[in-house]
Image (cartoon, rainbow, N blue to C red):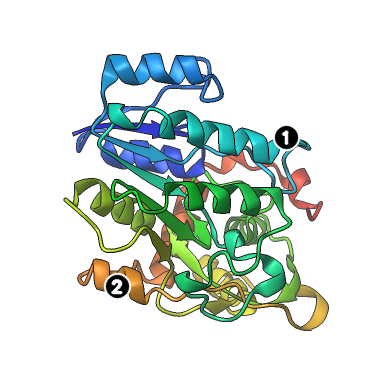
Amino acid sequence: MKVLLTGGNGFIGKNCRRSWKRKFHLLAPSRGELDLLDGAAVRRFLQMERPDGIVHAATTPGHRNAPPAPDLAEKNLRMFLNFHECRSLWERMVVLGSGVEYDPRSYAPRMKEEALGRSVPEDPTGLSKLACARIGRGDAAIVHLLPFGVFGPHEDWQIRFISNAICKALFDLPITLRQNRRFDYVWVGDLVRVLEHFLDASSWGHDVYNVTPDEPVELIELARLVLDVCGKQIPVVVARDGMGTEYSGDNSRLRAEIPNLTFHPLRDAIADLAGWYRENIGLVHREALLVDK
C-alpha cells in the first residue's frame, strides 16, 4: 500500500515513519518538498503519486511552546480542504484530531463521540479540527481519530508531562504540575497500530473514534510511577490543591471496531520511554527543565 503521511517530522509522524518503513510504501515529504497550504502543489503531488491512503497528522502548532499563530485555524482548514478537494486522487484518509475538539468548557469524564459538536471550541486548534471532522462527515473514505493524550519518543519534553517528568527525574529535579487531574494517555506505539488498522480495513463503522485507553490516570499517580521506574526519591510539587477538570474519552466505539486491541501497560511504556531518554540524554537540556512552561 502506498501511504502519504503528512507531518512526518512531528512527534507522531516520526514514530509512524519508524514503524512503517517496511510495512508500507511510505511517502513523507517535508514542508520544503510539499507545501500543504498550496492547493495546486497538493493536487500535482497527488496526481503524480496516487496514494492508496493518507494519514493527515500535520497541524499548525498552537501549544504553549510554539510561536503565536494568529492564522492557525485557517491553515489547518486549508491543509485539510486541499486534500478534500482532490477526493478522486486517493482511496482513504485518516485524520488526526484531539480531545480538544470537545471544547474544554464542556468537558465531562469519558466523553463520547456523540458529544462532538455540542459545544463549539473557542480554541483555534479545536475549532479547526472540529470543522475538518464536520466537512468529512458522511464520506465513508474519511475517518477522524481523537487521541486525548499521547506520549512517547520525540515528543516535546519541555511541556509534555510524562516526558518532562522523566527528564526531571533523570536530572534529579523536582517533578512539577499545576494541578492534579485525571487524564487519558495512550502510548504512541498503540496509536500507530490504530492508524494501521484504519489504513488496512476495507471499511469502518463510524467516521469519528476516540483513541483512548480503558481508564484515565491521575497525574500524581503518573509522577509516582515515573519516580519508581527511574529509581528516584525526589519531590513532586503541585502548584494548586484539588482536582482539575478530567480530560478523558470513552473508547467503547474503538473497542467495538478493533475487538483485539491491546494497550501497552502504562508502567512498561514509561520504562521504555525512560530508557529512550537515557540513550538520548544529549537531546535534553537541564537548564530548560528549570523553567516550567
Query: Circle 1 is placed at which residue position?
Result: 71
Q: CA distance from mark 1 to mark 2?
A: 36 Å
| In front: label 1 or label 2 | 1
Residue at left 66%, top 41%? Answer: 73
Q: Of all residues shown, which one is farthest toward the bottom? A: 242
Q: Residues within 10 Å of mark 2 (few under 14, many from 20)?
A: some
Does residue 137 lie above or below 111 as drawn?
above
Quarter that holds the N terminus: top left
Residue occupying the point 28% across, 69% down: 262
Q: Is residue 52 left or right of residue 9?
A: left
Task: Give the residue type at disc 2.
Answer: Arg
- Callouts 1 and 2 close, C-beta under 8 Å: no
Q: Position of residue 20 (x, y in %)?
A: 27, 38
Residue at numbered disc 2: 255
Q: Position of residue 164 (x, y in %)?
A: 64, 56
Residue 157 appearing in the image: no
Q: Position of residue 144 (x, y in %)?
A: 42, 53
